[in-house]
Image (cartoon, grey):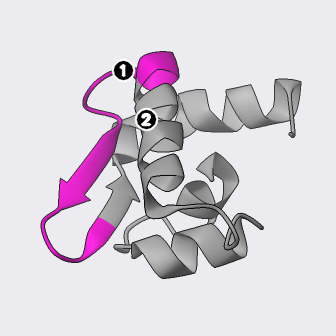
Amino acid sequence: MLAVLVANRRRVVGRRELSRAAGLAELSDRRCDSILVGVRRLLGPDSIVTVRSRGWMIAEDAVPAALELLESDPD
């Protein structure tokens, strides 16, 4: 999911698109939310911006740390 958010930075990504692009479409909506909680734990509480009724986007200042994390563990 983090890779999808980074690839789509500066744009809001909805739950369905995010799940599908991350290969998690068969999981529940709640699983998507819990993965985002984990991302916030890794990168900080303000790293993922929630856009009510639309989806999420990665905060621009969180992108460098996200890229570093993805390079160290691409899964």
Coordinates of residue 46 in the picture (x, y in percent) = 25, 31
Graded by Cα atoms within 10 Å as few (under 14), some (14 to 19) or many (20 or more), the crowding at tag 1 reads few
**Residue 39: x and y, percent?**
50, 32
Magenta span of residues: 41-55
- Name the spot of residue 24 as percent of width and height, x first: 70, 64
What's the residue at 60%, 69% (across, down)? 19
Q: Which residue is mark 1?
A: 44
Question: Which image quarter: residue 74?
Answer: top right
Q: Residue furthest left?
A: 52
Q: Nearer the viewer, residue 32 or 46?
A: 32
Residue kind at label 2, given as amino acid type: Ala
Q: Secondary structure at mark 1?
A: loop
Q: Residue at x 84, y 33 (%)?
A: 71
Could you tell me which quadrant the C terminus lies in? top right
Amino acid carrying mark 1 in the image: Gly
- The residue depicted at 25 percent of the width and 50 percent of the height is 49
Contact between marks 1 and 2 (CB within 8 A): the answer is yes
Q: Is residue 2 magenta?
A: no
Left of 61 or right of it: where is 64?
Answer: right
Q: Which badge, 1 or 2, is on the more N-terminal residue? A: 1
For numbered disc 2, what is the local secondary structure? helix
| Mark 1 to mark 2 CA distance (whole Å) | 8 Å
